[in-house]
Image (cartoon, rainbow, N blue to C red):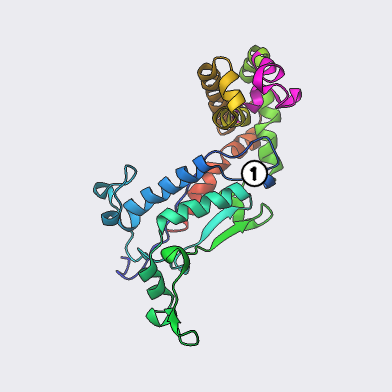
Amino acid sequence: MTPPSALLPLLFLALGGSTVRAQEDSDSNQVTSTSSKQLYRQGQAFRGRYLAPSTTTTKNASSFDAAVVQGLSQNAIDNAQLRILAQTDAWVVGGAAAFMQALYPPNKKAFIAAAGGETLAENHTGANATSYPLDGYQYPQIETLPSTDVNSIGIQGHVGCPTWQNATTTNLTTNPTLKDAAQKNADFYTKLFSSGPLQGTLAADDANFFNAYDIYNLVNYEYTHNETVFTNLADANATLARLAADAFTMERAKSDPGSSTANDTASVALTIAGRTLAKLAGRGR
């Protein structure tokens, strides 16, 4: 039986929202205001369920859903209790910061107490008292992991993995069902980026069904933030709905061994994300 004072490992996964121009170099991408708000609301929901339900009153979190983690600091960040991992992409780190802003919102008194007590705010040389900026803005220790770091497997294990890349590209492009869908949708994708407000936005070779996920993110971003695209994209709702459906089809196929015509090795690769998560979660037992 676990002693009352022990804190069991707990795994939180937070998904990012929209990014700036999914087809551009991810190193230059920045988190969008919409995505920041999405991650902030996720942080509120986590705080309201796992940390301090009585202090959170949002649509995303209710005290009726409380499952408070015993022993975890509620109001002031204790980085000794937390390990926050993120990819090195700017938009991912920005999203992680937004999430943490809501999980541990500014709290001047709690932060000063956790950092060393009221005496920490006294400045005898300046004959005054100081406080942390922004009414106690807290500083989470966000650890960014490149894909070359073995510890990054849990958050981006597919990056730089040739077996996974092969299983989700070469093998999927030879799948008869997906090949048929790509042929049927070829004109749609070609026309989308060869005319209208999106003309020239994407290279012709990349405008195809197999890139549906990235294309949906790109078109959705442009439609949301680009006035020209918002005003002139024909049948916008139908176009976005079609792209979303295609994106779902392709992403589901990437993790469905039944969608691959490959051998057992590829089938194992296609399910690696779920099996890796299960292994990481199992370490806390």
Q: Is residue 199 left or right of residue 213?
A: right
Residue drawn at the location 25% of the way across and 50% of the way down: 63
Question: What span is in magenta?
Answer: 188-213
SS class of the residue under badge 1? loop
Task: Where is residue 128? Give x, y as percent.
Answer: 44, 81
Instruction: Look at label 1 and name its amino acid.
Output: Asn
Q: Is residue 8 above or below residue 90?
A: below
Q: Is residue 215 visible?
A: yes
Magenta stretch, main secondary structure class: helix
Residue drawn at the location 57% of the way across and 45% of the way down: 31
The image quadrant that residue 151 belongs to is: bottom right
Q: Is residue 68 left or right of residue 165?
A: left
The residue nearer to you, when weighing 80 against 105, is 105
Q: Is residue 259 visible?
A: no
Residue that carries the numbered disc 1 in the rendered image: 29
Q: Which residue is at the far left?
A: 64
The residue nearer to you, when weighing 268 against 241, is 241
Q: Is residue 193 above or below residue 16?
A: above
Task: Where is residue 279? Give x, y as percent.
Answer: 51, 51
The image quadrant that residue 193 belongs to is: top right
Give yes or no for residue 21 being in the magenta stretch. no
The residue nearer to you, when weighing 24 against 155, is 24
In the picture, the quarter occupied by the C terminus is bottom left
Residue drawn at the location 65% of the way across and 21% of the way down: 197
Task: Where is residue 138? Give x, y as percent.
Answer: 46, 64
Q: Is residue 110 above or below residue 256?
A: below
In the picture, the quarter occupied by the N terminus is bottom left
Task: Where is residue 106? Give x, y as percent.
Answer: 41, 61
Residue drawn at the location 59% of the way across and 47% of the way down: 91
